[in-house]
C-alpha cells in the first residue's frame, strides 16, 4: 500500500486590502528601503514551489504588483477570504501558504516552522495569536480540504477566515513571538520602521 502524497504547496501573498486605517497602500510601505510587498514576496518564494500575489482587479496594473504572478480576486468586498478562495479555485489541488503583506517582522524561520509542522490530513496548519490564542489565518497553511468549509461560510455571509479555521480541523502551533504582529495605522508604521531600521 503506497503512502499518501501530500499536495504541493503554493504561496499566496495577500495584498488586496483597502488599508483604510493606514490611509495608504500597506504594500508600498518601505522598511530598510524596500517596499513591504517585495520583502514578503521574496520570503514567500524561497519556501514554496510557486508563489502568487493576490490582487483586486483594479490593482493588476499597479507598478509594484504588475511584474509578479497574480491571482485576481473573484469576490467583491469580503476581505482576505476573497484572496484565499480565488487561489483555491484557480489551483484546487494544492495547499496554500497564505501570508498577509502587513507582517513586517515575519521571517523565513517562522514560515519554515509552519511548513515543518504541516499536517496534510488536517484542513489547515496555523499559529495561535499571541494576543488571544485564536488561530492566525493570514500566516497559515490551508489544505485543499479547507475550501469547502470556507466557501460554504462565505456563501452564507460569514467572511471571517479565522472563524473558518476555528470550525475546521486545524493543527495549531504556539505563537511565534512577535513575528505575526501587523501594522494598521501611520503611528504603528513609524514605530515599526524605526524598530526594523535600528535592528538592520
Image (cartoon, rainbow, N blue to C red):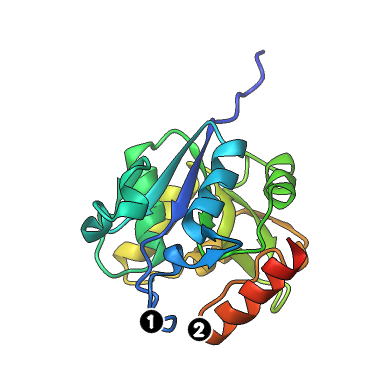
- Please state the horizontal and vertical placement of residue 22, each as a whole percent of the image: 44, 80
Q: Which residue is mark 1?
A: 23
Crowdedness of circle 1 by 10 Å Cα count: few (<14), some, many (20+)? few
Q: Earlier in the sequence, mark 2 or mark 1?
A: 1
Say if residue 146 shows up in the picture: yes
Q: How many marks?
A: 2
83 horizontally vs 56: left or right: right
Q: Which residue is mark 2?
A: 186
- Please state the horizontal and vertical placement of residue 26, each as a whole percent of the image: 44, 69
State which quarter of the image contains the N terminus.
top right
The residue lying at 54 percent from left, 55 percent from top is 99
In the image, 71 versus 95, the foreground residue is 71
The residue lying at 36 percent from left, 54 percent from top is 64
119 horizontally vs 188: left or right: right
| Mark 1, secondary structure of its residue | loop
| Mark 2, secondary structure of its residue | helix
State which quarter of the image contains the C terminus.
bottom right
Residue at mark 2 to residue at mark 1: CA–CA distance:
8 Å
- Please state the horizontal and vertical placement of residue 35, each as a whole percent of the image: 49, 59
132 horizontally vs 158: left or right: right
- Please state the horizontal and vertical placement of residue 75, each as a whole percent of the image: 26, 60
In the image, 151 versus 84, the foreground residue is 84
**Contact (Cβ within 8 Å) of mark 2 with mark 1:** yes
Q: Which label sits on residue 187?
A: none
Q: Residue furthest top?
A: 1
Quarter of the image for residue 88 reads top left
Say if residue 98 shows up in the picture: no
Crowdedness of circle 2 by 10 Å Cα count: few (<14), some, many (20+)? some
Q: Is residue 99 above or below residue 159?
A: above
Amino acid at each position: 500500500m503506497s503512502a499518501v502524497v501530500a499536495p504541493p504547496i503554493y504561496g499566496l501573498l495577500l495584498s488586496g486590502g483597502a488599508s483604510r486605517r493606514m490611509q495608504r497602500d500597506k504594500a508600498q510601505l518601505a522598511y530598510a528601503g524596500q517596499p513591504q510587498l517585495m520583502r514578503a514576496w521574496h520570503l514567500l518564494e524561497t519556501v514554496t514551489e510557486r508563489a502568487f500575489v493576490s490582487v483586486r482587479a483594479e490593482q493588476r496594473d499597479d507598478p509594484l504588483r504588475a511584474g509578479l504572478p497574480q491571482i485576481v480576486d473573484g469576490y467583491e468586498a469580503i476581505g482576505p477570504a476573497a484572496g484565499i478562495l480565488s487561489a483555491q479555485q484557480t489551483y484546487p489541488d494544492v495547499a496554500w501558504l497564505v501570508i498577509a503583506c502587513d507582517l513586517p517582522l515575519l521571517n523565513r524561520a517562522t514560515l519554515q516552522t509552519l511548513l515543518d509542522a504541516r499536517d496534510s490530513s488536517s484542513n489547515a496548519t496555523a499559529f495561535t495569536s499571541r494576543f488571544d490564542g485564536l488561530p492566525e489565518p493570514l500566516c497559515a497553511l490551508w489544505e485543499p480540504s479547507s475550501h469547502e468549509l470556507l466557501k460554504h461560510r462565505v456563501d452564507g455571509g460569514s467572511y471571517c477566515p479565522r472563524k473558518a479555521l476555528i470550525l475546521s480541523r486545524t493543527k495549531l502551533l504556539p505563537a511565534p513571538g512577535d513575528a505575526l504582529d501587523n501594522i494598521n495605522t501611520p503611528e504603528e508604521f513609524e514605530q515599526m520602521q524605526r524598530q526594523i531600521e535600528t535592528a538592520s
